[in-house]
Amino acid sequence: MNFHHRRANDAPEINLIPLIDVLLVILIFLAASTSFTRHRQLQVVLPQAQAEAPDASPFLELAISRDGLYALDGHYIDAADDAALADGLRQAATGKPDIALRIDADGQASHAAVVRALEAARLARIGKVHFLTQARP
């Protein structure tokens, strides 16, 4: 007599306790190895624009074309480098203390041409520099 009866449809049993143990160990490892520091963002203070009329002090007007050519008070300047442009500004500003420079740059002019004009103004010891813009309709 055989008292052991075997069932033909024994389904395999999945034990969830070891799986939960492994997942908890992985979770503890990730929590211990992760750093929760916040990186500081760069604080930037943007300039404010105001629609004020320029002061009535004497000024020189420097126009910059899209090709990088310079004209001082309507006369072309041969500015091969910053020093030549500074000499032109210095000669035009002689005898006029506290003179301002107005830069009227074309919208397609390169940034380098405008920076060269600013550097030339610094070399010519012109302290006030204004940029002319067009009002939007």
Image (cartoon, rainbow, N blue to C red):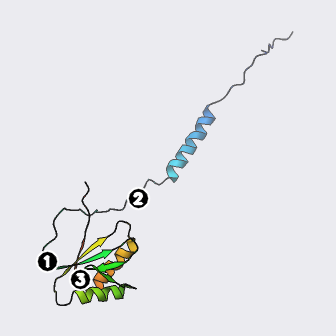
At x 67% / y 28%, what residue is drawn?
A: 14
Q: Which residue is mark 1?
A: 57
Q: CA distance from mark 2 to mark 3?
A: 41 Å
At x 27% / y 85%, what residue is drawn?
A: 89
Q: Earlier in the sequence, mark 2 or mark 3?
A: 2
At x 62% / y 31%, what residue is drawn?
A: 16
Q: Earlier in the sequence, mark 3 or mark 1?
A: 1
Q: Amino acid at mark 2?
A: His
Q: Identify whether 131 is placed above or below 23.
A: below
Badge 2 element? loop
Q: CA distance from mark 1 to mark 2?
A: 48 Å
Q: CA distance from mark 3 to mark 1?
A: 13 Å
Outermost left residue: 56
Badge 1 element? loop
Q: Amino acid at mark 3?
A: Ile
**How many residues crowd around disc 1 within 10 Å: few (fewer than 14), some, or many (20 or more)?**
few
